Amino acid sequence: MEEICLKAGKDCFAYIDNRRDAKGKYGYDFWGIIKNQFENEEQFVKWIKNKVSEKLLYSKSEQFPDFLFKTRKYAGKLICGSLLELKDSKGGSVASFNSTLPTKYKNLEEIDVINGKNLVSRIASIIDGDLSPENGYRNFERRCFYLVRTHAGKDDKVKVSVVDGSFFETVPKDHLIYQMFLNILRTHLEKREIKISSDTLNQIEKALSYVTDQTIIAASQIIEKASVRPRLRIMAEVHSEGNPHSSFYPEISERSINLIIEASSYEEKFAKVISQKIPEIDIFTIHHKRNGEHVVFQYKF
């Protein structure tokens, strides 16, 4: 799937996580455009090493996300800069989210805390150039998309979709996080056969309702007298109703490529542009039981 993204995205990326394979396997030099601004490779390396370690230029960094698109400016506002995370599975389920909770939006500050380092934002700021010093560059909300493939390697069953993060974020992230901690507490109480009053539980729930910031949760914690700094990484598995490739959505057919976006984001002019470029595209809606209508642009092969 990385090769598909590289060929389709061309020079639109501000960050690629696996820069090693991009160049070594697919002949895509992430730093190519910037290199062209210098007379030779030596000048480029001398300039870039003050910003990014030379050994990281063509590494597989294992950071979130897999791809980050370039930021642009329109009518005085920063736009674009979307995230794209790859989810590849040999079965029918969506691969687990091992780095973070899937959401509709994320910003660079949140990404840095989730990763525990600022490599993604540093590289993105280099590529985005003059836009990176702009006010709000690090905290403007960027759309999240997920490139999902199921039944990989099975030509008769494979499904591929670019899915809007809204499809997975069926309840607000803040609510999801504190309810998770509340469920953990309840399970411990049941296991130890400890009973507490409803009033006490309500007070605990109210207190936990303030524990909602994933950037704080994911940050390393300093514990007095502890020789380690623990940090929590929240992972997530997709419920079958949140899997666009499951039997809940028979409209997403086998051997198809789909773009799935929230209905509120749909614009007629957007559909016209796609239809003009790919006349074979089918456009229809599916109903997400937990999150309403979504528009699907489907190409069958």
Image (cartoon, helix red, strand yellow):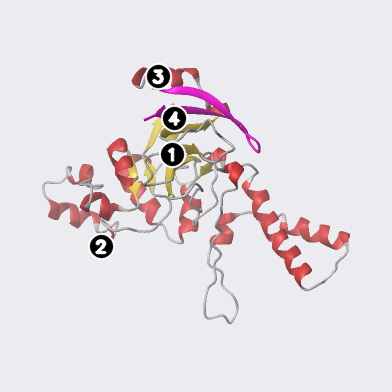
Sequence-wise, which precedes: disc 3 or disc 4?
4
Q: Quadrant of the C terminus?
A: top left
Q: Quadrant of the N terminus?
A: top left
What amino acid is at disc 4? Gly
- The residue singled out by tag 2 in the image is 55
Q: Position of residue 278 (x, y in %)?
A: 36, 22
- Label 1 SS: strand
What range is drawn magenta here? 281-301
Q: Is residue 293 magenta?
A: yes
- The residue singled out by tag 4 in the image is 76
Sequence-wise, which precedes: disc 2 or disc 3?
2
Q: Position of residue 184 (x, y in %)?
A: 70, 63
What amino acid is at disc 2? Lys
- The residue singled out by tag 3 in the image is 275
> Residue visible at 53% across and 63% down?
219
Q: Nearer the viewer, mark 3 or mark 4?
A: 3
Q: Position of residue 291 (x, y in %)?
A: 63, 36
37 vs 237, nearest the viewer: 237
Label annotation for residue 159: 1
